[in-house]
Amino acid sequence: MTKVIHKINQEVYSEDTCLIPTMGSLHKGHTTLFEQAKATPHAKIIVSIFVNRKQFNDKKDFDNYPIDIDNDIKLLEKVNVDYIFIPDESYIYPNKKILDVSSGAIGMQYEGKYREGHFDGVLTVVNRLFELINPSAAIFGRKDAQQLFLIKEMVNQFKKNIKIYEGKLIRETSGLAMSSRNLLLSDEAKKNASNIYKILLNTKNFYQNSKSISKSVSHGKTLFEKMEISYDYLDIVDVNSFRTPDKNTEKLLLITAGYVENIRLIDNLEI
Ligand code: PAF
């Protein structure tokens, strides 16, 4: 039986839980995370739904963020998670001082460069959720690769005993990475948005033939320009440091953020 809770009691705090933090407007990409959570050895699954004002640098973006709590609850009951945690803002951010986490230098690049303070807000809320819930594990999707990297760094830095699982990146059949923001796109825009994935695939292919990071990055940017899709960045980073790859790099990640109908879409591909 799924329970909807608004506060964490001692029972939930002391259980062996796997947490999936979300901002709601759940879609198939999330469902995969819930299924993945059920396959972990943890006794209970808890899904939080909280649209975190602190991670939006643009008030309009926060105000427009899609919310559909009734639908989310229905979906979570169907998947049969144990708890749906829907806190009030005053419970997450009470008047008493809570720790403001800084995302450091990496948090100011890529997503952080274009969304100032975004990752400080993400890490602050995730740390707060960890403190309130005391989970044994948590799952974060690979689509938000920089977020996943920074959360793992925070867990290491704060020496938290929480296992971080990586959730799969799920795509529509068109290749468009699933995201709650896709709900804001028209059908026409969705078609156009799938070109972002095509650009990643083409750039990956270019890299595999050229083995040149700089040429592949320029190639990818040219494709954005040819397709008349505006973008904030396209780059290749070391997946384990989120920095420019060097001779010790084992895995490369191609990352990008583009705009379709003024909706900001991020995507990435291992190359
Ligand atoms: O990825 C998200 O949906 C959010 O950034 C998260 C992790 C739930 C924190 O608000």
Image: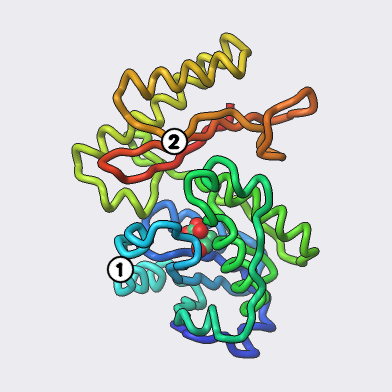
Q: Residue furthest bottom?
A: 10
Q: Residue at x 39, y 42 (%)?
A: 265
Label 1 secondary element: loop
Determine if the C-beta at disc 2 is less than 8 A from ligand 1: no
Residue 232 numbered mark, or none: 2
Label 2 secondary element: strand
Q: Label 1 amino acid?
A: Asp
Toward which corner of the image does residue 65 lie, by quadrant?
Answer: bottom left
Quadrant of image for the C terminus: top right
Q: Residue 215 location in percent, x, y?
A: 55, 13
Q: Residue 78 location in percent, x, y?
A: 38, 69
Q: Residue at x 56, y 86 (%)?
A: 95
Q: Residue at x 36, y 67 (%)?
A: 75
Does 110 appear above or below 167? above
Q: Position of 161 compared to 63: left or right?
A: right
Q: Label 2 amino acid?
A: Asp
Q: Position of 223 compared to 183: left or right?
A: right
Q: Residue 191 location in percent, x, y?
A: 25, 34
Mark 1: give few (<14), some (14-19) or many (20+) Cα within 10 Å.
few
Q: Residue under circle 1?
A: 68
* Residue 233 seen from this side: yes
